[in-house]
Amino acid sequence: MGRLVICDHPLIQHKVTIIRDKETNTKQFRELVDEVAMLMAYELTRDLPLEEVTVQTPVADAKGFMIAGRTMGLVPILRAGLGMVDGVLQILPSAKVGHIGLYRDHETLQPVEYYISLPTDVAERELIVIDPMLATGGSANAAIEMLKKRGCRPTKLMCLIAAPEGVRAVQEKHPDVDIYLAALDEKLNEHGYIVPGLGDAGDRLYGTD
Ligand code: PRP
Ligand code: URA
């Protein structure tokens, strides 16, 4: 079973609360999603391997540690996943970025695929799938499936807010993927929206409805 990590640092909780507020406008919403993604990236990179190195300070040799060069890739699910990419890239500037286009059919709640574009060396990279919302889990599962079918290694799923139903669905289908959240909410409503959630993440990021 993959790990479920709730990134509940006070700064993240503070910002997620403002993100949820329906009075928060598009500009603030976008900025805050970006900031939370950057803060969550600290937790996501906690297990990066280190190697011991020696540098010379002006005074003496100093032993220290540096990242041992694991290659990472980010795969946002369009559209809403795009809103978190720049924040993560601030912490992982050399990560390459692929894109998966999926939307949820409003009637059936099933994900519909419309796009995939991946960096050429993607199979050598450890991939983080990014989407602010994990509701039924259908979109995340479909994206992870699309990557695995192409011989890729998605190891982490990063979301802002999840419903327990979505977490269970991903854990059952992809027990090799760790899930990182800023908040785990109560439930889904009859329309497949997370309660209390934040509404439609794509619409709030891009000012559509
Ligand atoms: C939202 C969200 C996820 C999906 C989650 O995307 O960004 O991709 O719904 O729901 P699920 O877990 O039940 O699949 P949406 O379909 O609204 O597309 P958009 O990002 O283009 O707005
Ligand atoms: N997609 C969203 O954007 N919000 C939800 O609550 C569920 C799916």
Image (cartoon, rainbow, N blue to C red):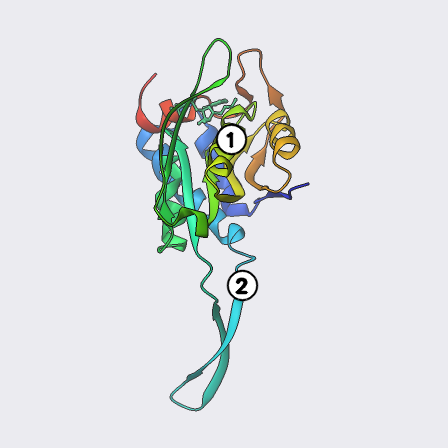
SS label for mark 1: helix
Q: CA distance from mark 1 to mark 2?
A: 26 Å
Q: Residue furthest bottom?
A: 59
As drawn, is 53 to the left or to the right of 58? right
Q: Which mark is residue 48?
A: none
103, above or below 58, in the image: above
- 131 and 42: which one is in front? 131
Q: Quadrant of the C terminus?
A: top left
- 93 and 100: which one is in front? 100
- 22 and 152: which one is in front? 152
Residue identified by numbered label 1: 140
Residue identified by numbered label 2: 49
As drawn, is 204 to the left or to the right of 13? left
Residue 45 position within the rendered picture, expressed as x and y whole percent measured from the top left: 51, 54
Residue 180 position within the rendered picture, expressed as x and y whole percent measured from the top left: 56, 42
Ligand 1 - quadrant of the structure image: top left
As drawn, is 155 to the left or to the right of 36? right
* Residue at x 66% of width, y 31% of height: 172
What amino acid does circle 2 point to?
Pro
* Residue at x 52% of width, y 50% of height: 44
Q: Residues within 10 Å of mark 2 (few under 14, many from 20)?
A: few
The quadrant where residue 78 appears? top left
Q: Can residue 125 be seen?
A: no
- 57 and 136: which one is in front? 136
Residue 187 position within the rendered picture, expressed as x and y whole percent measured from the top left: 62, 22
110, above or below 127, in the image: above
* Residue at x 61% of width, y 36% of height: 174
